[in-house]
Image: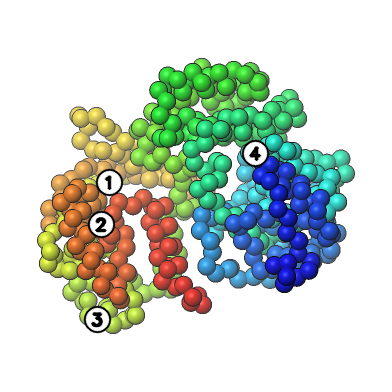
Amino acid sequence: MVQLDSRISVFHKKNEGVSVARNFGVNKATGQYILFVDGDDILTPWLLESAVQAVEDYDCDVIVGMINTTDKRPSIFPSREKNVKFELLDDHKKKELECHIFSKSCERWRPDQDGWEFNGEGCWAHFLKKEIALENQFIPGVAVGEDTIWALTMLNSSKDYRIGMLYEKWYYYIQNDYSVLNKYNPKIVGQLTLPVDILEKKYGASTGIVHVAYTDWLLMKLKHICFRAYLAEENTDPFNKKVSEFSKVLHTAPWIEVLNRRNTQPFKKRLKFFLYDKNIALYFYSCLKLVNYFNALYQGIPIGGYTKMIANLLDGIKVRLNTDYQEHKSELDALADKVVYTGPIDAYFDYKLGTLEYRSVRFETELLDQPNFQGNAAVNYTDRETQWTRIIEHKWFEFGKDENGNDLPKTIISREYSSEWKPGDEPYYPVNDAKNSLLYSEYKKLADAENKVIFGGRLGEYKYYDMDQVIAAVLEKCEKEFVGENV
């Protein structure tokens, strides 16, 4: 790189942490502007051009662009937009950003349907004048939360910097398995205690909306500690030892000061702090992992539900219902160069090697003339006496509101029953035992020879998928299928 352009300088230094490395780079820089980039992240091709132009056109000290957090490197860039919106932050909007840094509370800055957002908490997608970077350096030794402290320090500077938000796609943050907060991290207690200690000095005694957002941030960090340190599968310590160690952490500074303020909080937050203070939190989260079908720290569904998402995907596409693919295979195969098949893989091959086994379910759905039945989207039943495995109250997936935000006066529930499967029934789940796994492996050999067909989904791959896993698998197959294509 240096040989290609004399303006590029490369420096090598020993590992002293990300804060020291960033400060080192700022001090070595000779240009007018600073942009922080992690080594595995990706910039959109227009970022630098847009950033320089925005700083000059709007006379700003700092320009913040949009960021997309993903675990996969993009194979193609989105189209560059015209007439990009710009928003200069006055005192009120700076206070709004301060809250957003802590709790992602500002709706217009949260992720859009493609995952693009303003991540005020990090330094990524921040383009700033060099003198601003020199005045606001990172605190050495802070391994987690250094970006939060940096962003808040710059935002609250007495010099009142002109900060603007440019609604343009700038930066792909590649979240890898080695991220400090991504997986099991036995050091996370100490790593989070240091930034909390620093922020407590400014925000511990604060009031108003910023203190509310800061409290949300503290509760999330405590939850990170629970799941990433004590409840991670890699932590094999006896549970009583985990509880004892966590209790010691919570009853030393700065966490003890945080817990001591719980009586000033609204009831729900006061209850959460009570669970931590009385050593109940780990028991609670541990039980939650046992009774919850999903152990992911973050859970959610698309806005409007999956029906709306699929409807959007099918917009403008001809859909033929009540059409058996096997009966019309020749006709349908002739319509395209590739076929995506998500039906049972053994049915595709006419069961020539034998029939795979499945589990099935049946539903009983009921409209109730009442606004609320159980207050939750899904309640699981694990006792022997109850015939159904769970009850789904559909309205709560959208918080009890219709598409216009109005309360729904009635509710629909579905009772789900486990059902024995037999050929002819609708298959739902594969049976992952040795016999069926062996039979599937033989069918997969046949499938791999079908160059025109892409097999996918629970039935096509004879594999249990959650929705997030299905979507990830689809994106991976698309990337593999269209590699090198201009799509």
C-alpha gap between disc 1 and disc 3 = 37 Å
Regarding residue 145, the answer to whether it shows in the image is no
Give, as a three-letter code, the residue at label 2: Tyr
- Residue beneath disc 2: 462
Give, as a three-letter code, the residue at label 4: Ala
Viewer-nearest residue: 406 or 31: 31
Comes first in the chain, label 3 or label 4:
4
Left or right: residue 43 versus residue 353 is right
Disc 4 element: loop
Left or right: residue 34 versus residue 231 is right
Q: Residue at x 53, y 25 (%)?
A: 272
Left or right: residue 402 versus residue 384 is right
Give, as a three-letter code, the residue at label 3: Glu
Q: Give the numbered dot on residue 331.
A: 3
- Residue beneath disc 4: 143
Q: Residue at x 55, y 45 (%)?
A: 179
Eyeballing the image, is 273 above or below 142?
A: above
Comes first in the chain, label 1 or label 4:
4
Q: Residue at x 32, y 36 (%)?
A: 380
Q: Position of residue 245 (x, y in %)?
A: 51, 21
Disc 2 element: loop
Viewer-nearest of labels 2 and 3? 2
Task: Please identify the residue farthest to the right as the structure is shown.
Answer: 159
C-alpha gap between disc 2 and disc 3 = 26 Å
Q: Quadrant of the N terminus?
A: bottom right
Q: Are marks 1 and 3 in contact (CB under 8 Å)?
A: no
Q: Position of residue 81 (x, y in %)?
A: 65, 69
